[in-house]
Image (spheres, rainbow, N blue to C red):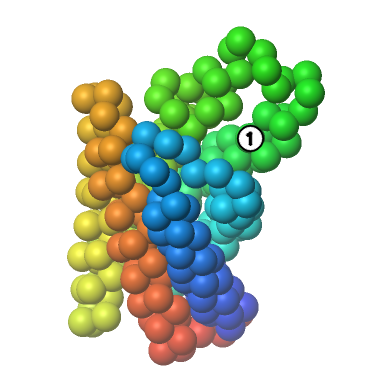
Amino acid sequence: MKFTATARSLGIFSAAATVILLVAYALMLTVGLASLESPQQPIGDPIFTILEVLIIVMMPAMVALIVAIHAWVPMQAKTLTLTSLVFMGLLAGVTSVVHFCVLTLSRQPEFVGRAWESLVFAFAWPSVVYALDILAWDVFFPLSVLFAAPVFRGSHLAAWIRVLMIASGVLSLAGLSGVVTGDMQLRNIGIVGYVGVFLVVAALLAILFYRATPQEA
């Protein structure tokens, strides 16, 4: 798989789309959290619905971004980026299913008001969708970026991407401390990793791909 002009365009577009969507997500999350009377209170509509939609829309861009990285790296590094792509695909699949079900099934009369509803659909610990979302973002996401990080070498820009990818992955893994301790406020550490730090990574990747010279097909 070569870094063709198409792969370069895909990289630039997907990186830019990821930045825009992460900025929108961060803004909506900030507004939602600021509106809460207590940290234990869930974010309500319409902000909650907007956040759910943004996550689903974000997934194709993030997968395409890893595909572009896989095309960009030399042949000897493609084993790492292919592994990264698999984990990003797992993230996209799991979190898309979670948030699509929350947006659709959780609002159907057949599910609303059931005794077990909060144990399945609530974004509060413990629940099925919360556990799956933690698996996606605090396990699959950090594995994806940590496998991709070592391939960025040869320039100051690449070095910054590598360092920030590692930071993003480590912080995201640290979000698992919420599960270990039962304190979901600690999961906010992971949010810093996969929203705040990865936003900067995506912006730098857009610059990297813009400067890169495509290979002939």
Looking at the picture, how far across and down is residue 142, in whole percent? 33, 47
Residue 202 in view, yes or no: yes
For the image shown, how many numbered marks are present on the structure? 1
Name the residue at 61% across, 18% down: 117
Q: Amino acid at mark 1?
A: Val
The part of the image, by quadrant, that contains residue 9 is bottom right
42 displayed left or right of 165: right
The part of the image, by quadrant, that contains residue 81 is bottom left
Say if 60 sits above or below 190 in the image. Answer: below
Looking at the picture, how far across and down is residue 140, in whole percent? 41, 41
Q: Residue furthest top?
A: 115
For the C terminus, the quadrant is bottom right
Mark 1 neighbour class, 10 Å CA radius: few under 14, some 14 to 19, many 20 or more:
some
Question: Can you identify the residue that label 1 sits on?
Answer: 102
In front of the other: 207 or 36:
36
Say if 66 sits above or below 15 in the image. Answer: above
42 displayed left or right of 169: right
198 displayed left or right of 173: right
Looking at the picture, how far across and down is residue 128, in whole percent? 51, 22
Looking at the picture, how far across and down is residue 124, in whole percent? 44, 29
Say if 139 sits above or below 147 in the image. Answer: above
Residue 84 in view, yes or no: no
Q: Residue furthest right?
A: 109
Name the residue at 67% across, 39% down: 103
